[in-house]
Amino acid sequence: MYFRHSRLSSFKRQLNLYGFEQINIGPFRGGYYHENFHRDNPESCRRMRRVAVKVSGGATTQRNKKKKESEQDIKGNNDKIKADEKIASSNEKKRSNGL
């Protein structure tokens, strides 16, 4: 089995998804353990299975919400700019008609 990750947190997440448990006591504290992961028996790794991850949409929903809010802010700013341009144009017309 081979994990290709550049971040430790991603690697740890993969270990957890494959059922590894972190060792919290003793001389191997901070290490990970899996009953089917043995140096002398690499064939036992074939029994290891990755746990399916449920997609909750939480991060995606928040990302879409922020994107929508940002788009609304931009639209609001564009509407303000258009209103300011109309006022400026109207003031220019008044000045040119007054002269």
Image (cartoon, rainbow, N blue to C red):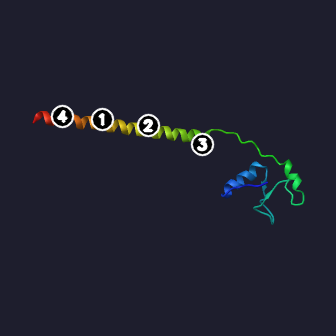
Q: Secondary structure at mark 1?
A: helix
To which residue does mark 1 refer?
83
Measured in 3D between alpha carbons, the distance from the residue under mark 2 to the one under mark 4, in whole angstroms, is 31 Å
Residue at 73% x, 51% y: name it. 14
Q: Secondary structure at mark 4?
A: helix
* Residue 28 image point, x, y percent: 80, 64
Measured in 3D between alpha carbons, the distance from the residue under mark 3 to the one under mark 4, in whole angstroms, is 51 Å
Q: Type of residue at label 3?
A: Ala
To which residue does mark 4 refer?
93
Crowd band around label 3 with a 10 angstrom C-alpha radius: few (<14), some (14–19), many (20+): few
Q: Is residue 63 above or below residue 41?
A: above
Q: Type of residue at label 1?
A: Ala
Measured in 3D between alpha carbons, the distance from the residue under mark 4 to the one under mark 1, in whole angstroms, is 15 Å
Q: Nearer the viewer, mark 4 or mark 1?
A: 4
Measured in 3D between alpha carbons, the distance from the residue under mark 1 to the one under mark 2, in whole angstroms, is 16 Å
- Locate residue 33: give its quadrant: bottom right
| Labelled pair 2, 3 in contact (Cβ < 8 Å) | no
Q: Earlier in the sequence, mark 4 or mark 1?
A: 1
Q: Is residue 57 above or below residue 32?
A: above
Q: Nearer the viewer, mark 3 or mark 1?
A: 1
The answer to whether residue 68 is left or right of residue 43 is left
To which residue does mark 3 refer?
59
What is the quadrant of the C terminus in the image? Answer: top left
**Residue 40 image label:** none
Measured in 3D between alpha carbons, the distance from the residue under mark 3 to the one under mark 1, in whole angstroms, is 36 Å
